[in-house]
Image (cartoon, grey):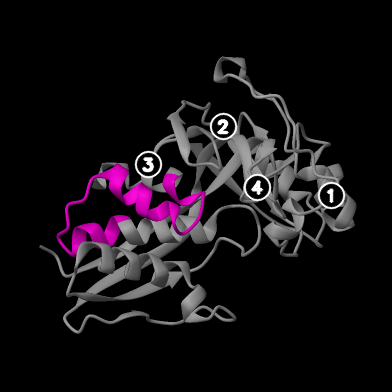
Amino acid sequence: MSDHYDQVPAPAKLNLFLHVTGRRSDGYHTLQTLFTFVDYGDTLDFVRTEDGEIRQRHPLPGIPAQEDLCIRAAQLLQQAGGVRYGAVIGIDKKIPLGGGLGGGSSDAATTLLALNRLWGLGWERARLAALGLRLGADVPVFVGGHAAFAEGIGERLTPFRVPECWYLIAHPGIAIPTREIFEDPDLTRDSIPVKMCDFSAGFGRNDLQPVVVRRYPRVARLLEWLGRWGDARMTGSGACCFVPFEEASEAQSALMQMPPEYKGFIARGMNKHPLRDWV
């Protein structure tokens, strides 16, 4: 059994559409969304320790340890598995915070998958996903390891094969609090549920997008610019937006013309998480 792992990927995700279908009595919203991974993300490394402590090698600026999803994921798995080992976790952070790309959830999922092996637990994927749901509704899709149609609060997953096109993904330079958007009184909460057989390229919308556009003109301007190139959408609750391309060269050409007030990158869609075979 290895005592460390280096260069472990935590990819970003996109919501190709996101419909809000209702609100439960506990305040959580019910959703339908289609997740795909992209070949851009954070990179983590892990060292197993004998002292039982869980710590970040270099704590993320502005994020207290008790709110760090990697630390919380490791502590949950340690407690649930009765593990005596600890871990030192390092992270090379590339996914922007508050961007709707699932960075924290992906990091947490990668932590669960890596420490499951590093600590010799041998848990099945479903058990890890159930634990991950306690950290956030997006964690199970990263643990599940496949592009998926999600329902419920995002935890009911059906694997789905998505065309692996290229995306220009752009960040407007702001972070958007998810709770603020879901609590907005003007949010659409009654989208009619769909069946996945209805899906095709360009299907649906992001019900959170109109609220974000009204509250954040910078996102509105970004979507307007991206719309020159195709069906531009926001992912998650924002602030990142994307537009698909069939060819990488087309996406790169658009990126070269991006206004300097925004930051962007090109990524390829992936149906399979790079750690899909780890469990």
Would you say the residues marked 1 and 3 are in contact, meaning their CB atoms lie under 8 Å apart? no
Would you say the residues marked 2 and 4 are in contact, meaning their CB atoms lie under 8 Å apart? no
Badge 4 density bin: few <14, some 14–19, many ≥20, Cα 10 Å: many
Q: Does the magenta stretch include residue 79?
A: no
Q: Which amino acid does label 4 sit on?
A: Gly
* Residue 256 appears anywhere in the view: yes
Say which label, 2 or 1, has the lower sequence index.
2
- Mark 2 and mark 4: Cα distance apart in space: 19 Å
Q: Is residue 120 magenta?
A: yes
Say which label, 2 or 3, has the lower sequence index.
3
| Residue matched to label 1 | 185
Camera-nearest label, 2 or 4? 4
Q: In this picture, which residue range is highlighted in magenta?
A: 113-140
Disc 3 is placed on an element classified as: helix
What residue lies at 19% left-to-right and 75% top-to-bottom? Answer: 85
Disc 1 is placed on an element classified as: loop
Disc 2 is placed on an element classified as: loop
Say which label, 1 or 3, has the lower sequence index.
3
Camera-nearest label, 2 or 3? 3
Would you say the residues marked 2 and 3 are in contact, meaning their CB atoms lie under 8 Å apart? no
Based on the displayed image, in which of its 4 quarters is residue 231 positioned?
A: top right
| Residue matched to label 2 | 165
Q: What residue type is labelled 1?
A: Pro
| Residue matched to label 3 | 144
